[in-house]
Amino acid sequence: MTRPLQNRRILLVIGGGIAAYKALDLIRRLRERGAQVRPLLTKGAQEFVTPLAAAALAGERAHTDLFDRAEEADIGHIKLARDADAIVVAPATASLMARMATGDSSDLAATVLLATTLPILIAPAMNVRMWQHPATQRNLATLRGDGVRVVGPNEGAMAEAEFGPGRLAEPAEIADAVETMLAEARPASGFGFLAGRGATAEAASGPLAGRRVLVTSGPTHEPIDPVRYLANRSSGRQGHAIAAAAAAAGATVILVSGPVAIPHPPGVQVVPVETARAMLAAVEAALPADLAIFAAAVGDWRPAETRASKIKKDGSAPAPLALVENPDILATIAGRSAGRPRLVVGFAAETDRVLENARAKIARKGCDLIVANDVSPAGGVMGGTANTVHLVGRDGTVETWPTLDKDEVGRRLIQRFARLLDP
């Protein structure tokens, strides 16, 4: 049976972070799917894993030195930049991302990444404060704008006993992202990172061709301790359907997704997050955008304190759970004085007084349009495949649609938004 990455050639650039050890597992998983993997280790990576270990698992020589006499006799870094189907950078450290974003070519990895026209996927991994630093987020936005795909980082405990976004995506997640990228990638166009973007002739001429669309989807998880978290019942089906419809309409789509159990749609750049604060950071990093659609069911509250170890039941009074308010992502983006998307759409998931609450929300948040729906348990909207939506405008006008499959709701919403962008 043909494996999903059968005979696909992957150049794996391993950055110098503690997560470099996971790159060895990634080599194994890529090879299990049929890929041929050629490792390239930065100087920092060699402090965590050895070229010998990477080469043994890959069955290929591991490359390390820009000034290798044997390799550079025939301009080896250029051959590495071309002789593959895709490049994967895992872990992508803050330093390596900065070198990529600024076109630095001070070592073999940076030089190959600068000289390539292949599709590129990066899997960032670093300390939570390094990830959230404005410089890293600017570099991330630059790389996304250049067409680089991104998977992760995930949230969790750090080596420094901290908690937050910055953990390397799991090797299986990265392998899945490689499959998706190669399935969507066009032949190399000669325009650097842009060669990694996929498109069809229909999408290229669609109503959102040339537009950049940001979509949030799914729930958020707010950790109480390493085992428990606060969450909601959102499945992400509606947000994912909207992202898929936007991609089919020709847009470049950034999907910021909370934890979901459904497949991510093809043709979009997925940024997985866990918490509301991580979602806000990812949204701000994904700007600028022409259209921003906030379909995620973001948790309004989070625990004031996340315990480092599991809270035990000892037979006394229940452990106190103090809550603090999460950032308001929709209001933050809608209220921007600079870099605000031309069209900002919010969602109002209500269990009662749907239209009244939606009108109040659009006035309070400052967005251009609200998509309101009734998510009371009797309707089965959360987790279900159908939806009944009401489009509420700034002037209070309401347009009610019949109950439709969520995929059809997504297609109709995208058609409507495209007309609003280009009347």
Image: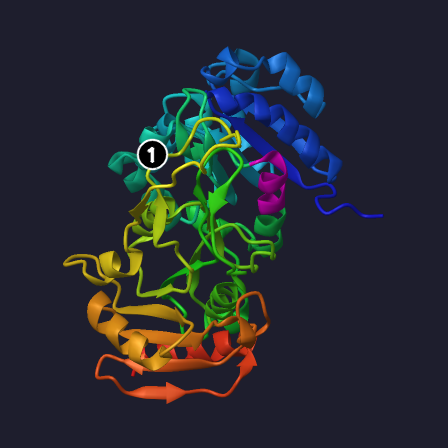
Please give the name of the residue rendered at 63% of the width and 24% of the height, measured from the top-left corner. Answer: 24
| Quarter-of-image position of residue 419 | bottom left
Count of numbered badges drawn on the protein? 1
Say whether residue 243 is visible. Answer: yes
Please give the name of the residue rendered at 16% of the width and 57% of the height, measured from the top-left corner. Answer: 338
In the displayed orientation, state which residue is furthest to the right. 1
Left or right of 328 on screen, residue 223? right
Q: Residue 351 at x, y = what percent? A: 42, 72
Q: Which residues are magenta?
A: 170-178
- The one nearer the camera, 59 or 314, is 314
Q: Residue 340 at x, y = what percent? A: 22, 61
Say whether residue 422 is visible. Answer: no
In the displayed orientation, state which residue is furthest to the front. 316
Left or right of 151 on screen, residue 390? left
- Is residue 132 covered in magenta? no
- In this rendering, the answer to whether 258 lies above or below 244 is above
Q: Residue 325 at x, y = what percent? A: 29, 49
At mark 1, the secondary structure is loop
- In this rendering, the answer to whether 362 lies above or below 84 is below
Q: Amino acid at mark 1?
A: Gly
| Quarter-of-image position of residue 37 | top right
Q: Residue 126 at x, y = what percent? A: 41, 28
- Quarter of the C terminus within the rendering: bottom left
- The one nearer the camera, 9 or 244, is 244
Name the chief secondary structure element in magenta. Answer: helix
- In this rendering, the answer to whether 231 lies above or below 99 is below
- The one nearer the camera, 170 or 99, is 170
- The one nearer the camera, 16 or 42, is 16
| Quarter-of-image position of residue 33 | top right
* Residue annotated with mark 1: 103
Please give the name of the residue rendered at 56% of the width and 60% of the height, measured from the top-left corner. Answer: 265
